[in-house]
Amino acid sequence: MTAAAPEVRRYASAEELAERVAAALVATLADVQRQGRVPAVVLTGGTIAASIHRAVADSPDAGSVDWGRVDVWFGDERFVPAGDPDRNLGQAAEALLDQLPFDPTRVHPMPASDAGEGDVTAAAAAYADELRARDSDGFDVVMLSLGPDGHVASLFPGFPQLRVRDTEAVAVTDSPKPPPERVSLTFTALNRAREVWLLVSGEAKAETAARALATGADAAEVHDLPAVGVHGLERTVWFLDADAASRL
């Protein structure tokens, strides 16, 4: 089945982008719960993600969601000790997870390097096993930041992890961004989402966003620009502020 063309939403500023994404996430989670399901969301890291997390926690509509009945996963994680400030989990906890009444048993962090899972390859395998055991229906929303080089999660241009299709999580041992060891969801897991949201802020990412959204003869290849390899089953949405959208 051919993926539907992505939807592009543009906002005047990073602040407006964060507020609108937060509102969309709250509304989506509430709608899934009204359908009688437990929603599953994949969080990402980065500056704009932190702003979105804070906006969700501060949303006037946050009370419409039963936060104790939301499953939380992560798109990638730095394989460092649990208390390391580089961990996406710490950022998400400070801005969102500790601000609303999430059920800790429904929050699924990727293993830290001191968690006793072994090396980064074993940590990735453990997370894949957890996903297979707990995630029978896929994700409702996957949120992904876009790197200036076009990477999403920790799937980097030209890396062999882009070709992995037989598991849900994979180890990265030579990340071009420090720290070098990471765990990342694969396209197999990411593309099992009903909706994929790409969150893009800042002029530094404008050229990459334009390349990722190009079509026809100008369309990018996934091994050059991994962001083009993620697609929601129902919808793929690019949320961009004015700077990030300046070259579209």
Image (cartoon, rainbow, N blue to C red):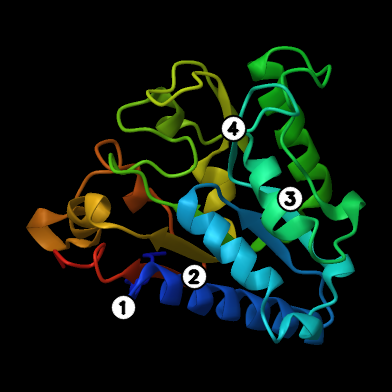
Q: Disc 4 on helix, strand or loop?
A: loop
Which quarter of the rendering shows the C terminus?
bottom left
From the top left corner, tell me how far across and down residue 28 is, in percent: 64, 79
Report whether 223 appears left or right of 184: left
In the image, which disc is placed on residue 86? 4
From the top left corner, tell me how far across and down residue 100 is, in percent: 81, 66
**Residue 232 can be seen, yes or no:** no
Picture quadrant where residue 88 is located: top right
From the top left corner, tell me how far across and down residue 68 is, in percent: 89, 67
Identify residue type, mark 3.
Ala
Which quarter of the rendering shows the N terminus?
bottom left
In the image, which disc is placed on residue 93? 3
Q: Disc 3 on helix, strand or loop?
A: helix
> Quick one: 25 or 3, which is closer to the camera?
25
Q: Disc 2 on helix, strand or loop?
A: helix
User: Which of pointers 1 and 4 lies earlier in the amino acid sequence?
Assistant: 1
What is the spatial separation of the Cα atoms under label 1 and label 2, in whole angstroms? 11 Å
What residue is drawn where x is 84% and y is 81%?
36
User: Which of pointers 3 and 2 lies earlier in the amino acid sequence?
Assistant: 2
What is the spatial separation of the Cα atoms under label 4 and label 2, in whole angstroms? 21 Å
Report whether 9 appears left or right of 18: left
Identify residue type, mark 4.
Asp
What is the spatial separation of the Cα atoms under label 4 and label 3, in whole angstroms? 13 Å
> Quick one: 84 or 104, which is closer to the camera?
84
Report whether 181 appears left or right of 200: right
Up the image or down, 114 lies above or below 177; here it is above
Residue that label 2 marks = 18
Neighbourhood count class around disc 1 (C-alpha, 10 Å): few under 14, some 14–19, many 20 upward: few
What residue is drawn where x is 36% and y is 65%?
2
Up the image or down, 2 lies above or below 204; here it is below
User: Which of pointers 4 and 2 lies earlier in the amino acid sequence?
Assistant: 2
